[in-house]
Image (cartoon, helix red, strand yellow):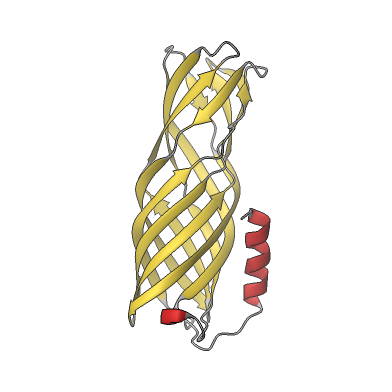
Amino acid sequence: MTLKSITFAAIAAFGMTSAYAIPAGTWSVAAGAHMVDPKSDNGKLVNDALSVDVDDDIRPTISGEYFVADNVGIELLAALPFHHDFELKNAEGVVLTGKTQHLPPTLSVQYHFDNDMMPMNVKPFVGVGVNYTTFFKERISNGADLEFDDSVGVAGHVGIDIPYAPTESFRIDARYMDIKTDASLDGNDIGEVDISPWAYGVAFVKQF
């Protein structure tokens, strides 16, 4: 699945009607965890001399959503800092290792729709929005001063809510985040790291 397909799904969903709409004015809170899984081939640095490989990580997440219209919500995702190990490798296979942390708050517009033909009254949803990622505590094994710039990019969201009580459900979701950061070493620009992960999560959701 690509961000383009998520966007088309979101547009289509906004045109649908629902037999059991989530009413405007509803709040929901989702608490769970996500695994941030960076794309493969995270770019090349120092005039293509070093390839970059970024590992995944799992952290607790929380989101709040306010429904501005029936079935249409504005959601803000927050998390504890994600920790990523990475490797920089040259053509001879010599490796430098490093670490970084980041926070990726994401704001999305989402459409939730019900289908009385679906089992267990499962409620799918789709969303599109913007991600802001800030990096900190960058370290590299040779002791040089490494910095990653903050990133702003588009984000997509798909998932399903499985109700188990009138105002409570279990959520399974996936998010795409366009995260690209300019890297510098000892104050010199060395290129762009393209993380652009999928984030896979589960959560418990409560409506108010």
Q: Does 192 sit left or right of 85 as displayed?
A: right
- Of the pair 71 and 188, the residue shown nearer to us: 71
- Asked which quadrant contains residue 193, the reply is top right
Residue at the bottom extreme of this rendering: 19
Identify the image quadrant of residue 184.
top right
Tell me: residue 200, above or below residue 182.
below
Question: What's the residue at 46%, 35% (across, down)?
Answer: 135
For residue 199, side relative to residue 15 (left or right): left
- Quadrant including the C terminus: bottom left
Which residue occupies the foreground of this view, 64 or 178? 178
Quadrant including the N terminus: bottom right
Of 139 and 4, the residue lying toward us: 4
Q: Would residue 25 be seen by someone viewing this image from the given angle?
A: no
Q: Nearer the viewer, residue 30 or 41?
A: 41
Residue 31 is left or right of residue 127, and the answer is: left
Query: x, y (%) of residue 190?
Result: 61, 20
Question: Residue 139: x and y, percent?
Answer: 42, 22
Q: Residue at x 68, y 65 (%)?
A: 8
Is 161 placed above or below 90 here?
below
The x, y position of residue 121, in whole percent, is 44, 81
Q: How many discs mark residues in the rendered view? A: 0
**Residue 92 against residue 88 in the figure, above or below:** above
The reply to whether residue 79 is visible in this rendering is yes
Residue 202 in which image quadrant: bottom left
Residue at (43, 71) in percent of width and height: 161
Tell me residue 206's x, y (percent). 34, 72
